Structure formats: C-alpha cells, structure tokens
Image: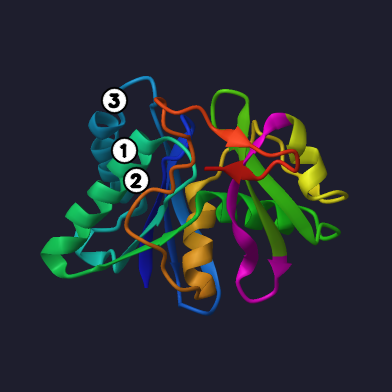
Amino acid sequence: MIVLASEFSREDSTLALLEGERGGACRLLGGRSVDARQRRSQSLFPAAEALLRETGVEWAGVDAFAVGIGPGSYTGLRVAITAARGWALPRGRTVWTCPSAAALAAECFAEDPSLDAAVVHGDARRGTRWAGWFRRDAAALARQEGEFVVLPEAVLAERWPGVARIAEERAPRAEWVGRLFFAGGASGALSPIYMNPAVQIAPRFDAAGRPVG
C-alpha cells in the first residue's frame, strides 16, 4: 500500500510518500519540504501535487494518509489534519495519526542503536516546556511512557534523570510518521496535541513541578 505522510508540527514542515505493508517493511518513495514562509494551507497542496508527480503516483493510488499531530504548532497541525481528511474522504481512505514527538523519537532510535530511551520536548511558552518520554520498541519503533506533561523549564532535567533529551532544534519528519504507520500501531485522535497553557491564565506548579489547579 502507498501512504502519504505529513508532519506540520514545526516550521520545518514535510511531506513523504511511502510504500509497504502494515506490520511489515516499507520504503520511502519520495519526500518534499513545505515552504513555511508562506501560509501552510497555501503551500501544502502544490507541494503534495508535486510530490505525487515526481514519484509517478496518482491520487487514486494513495491508500491512506498518516499525520503527525504534535505537540507543536496548532495552526500547522490543523492544516495537515484537515488536508488529509479532505484527500481521504472522496475515496473513503483512512486517516491515521500519531504524536509528532513519537516520529522524532523513532528516528533518533534508528540513528543510535545504543539509545534505549529519550525525552522529546519543546517550548510551551512563559517559562514552561512540554515533554514526553519514549522507549525503544522493536515492533512499534518508539513507545510512549505516560502522557505528555508541561513543566517549568528548571524542572525538566530533574523529571527523567539520566534519560537523553533530544535537541529541541530537531524537527520531526513526515518520513517517520509514515514509518510509524507501517509499524502497525493504533491511530491517535484526529485533533492536534496542543500543550501551550491558555494565554489568559498563567500556569502554576508546586515545589515538585506538578501542575496546580
């Protein structure tokens, strides 16, 4: 089967086309960056058309759509999810989702065989960080332990002592969203994972870094 994957949680947005079997091997047919200097909704569709043209795949030949859902840019994630649903609807195709952070963790595990666990994190505004802890998994590529959390910046290093933190500059890539699809995991929700606290209410934490209220 052929899958079009999209990853729009960061400004470094990407698309990827992969072919394989669920629960089996897959190969990358092609990938494309999306120009984040423009409105993503305006640049996504020409980029997708160009990717299919370059790989010789027709829209009718795309069997499913895989989308990274964050945490990250709420607007970018909404654009990617809405586009995938629009592409999928006419032919009754599947839209499958996963955390963007899981795709990044899986890529890092593939790069470094000695890495068994990693923390993926990002800016949640006003001195806070969102973070999630992932373990290497032979079947699913990356398995999340617990839920994403929002922490004061000073507490992040203390939450998972000794666990490697993936550099914030690294952006998840659509290729690895697609690889997680082919690994066979269950789909997430069709909505963005948004970890930034409400602007109107400042987040509060206790001495151990746990959210209060």
Label 3 vs label 1, nearer the camera:
3
Q: Position of residue 64 (x, y in %)?
A: 31, 66
In the rendered structure, are the residues bearing label 2 and label 1 in contact, judged by CB atoms less than 8 Å apart? yes
Magenta residues, start to end = 136-153
Mark carried by residue 47? 1
Up-down relation of residue 6 to residue 184 (above or below): above
Up-down relation of residue 3 to residue 10 (above or below): below
> Is residue 162 something one can see in this rendering?
yes
Residue type at mark 1? Ala
Residue type at mark 3? Arg
Q: Which residue is mark 2?
A: 51
Q: Which residue is mark 3?
A: 39
Image position of 5 (left or right of 71):
left
Image position of 68 (left or right of 106):
left
Instruction: Write the residue at 73% across / 57% down.
Output: 109
Q: Position of residue 38 (x, y in %)?
A: 32, 21
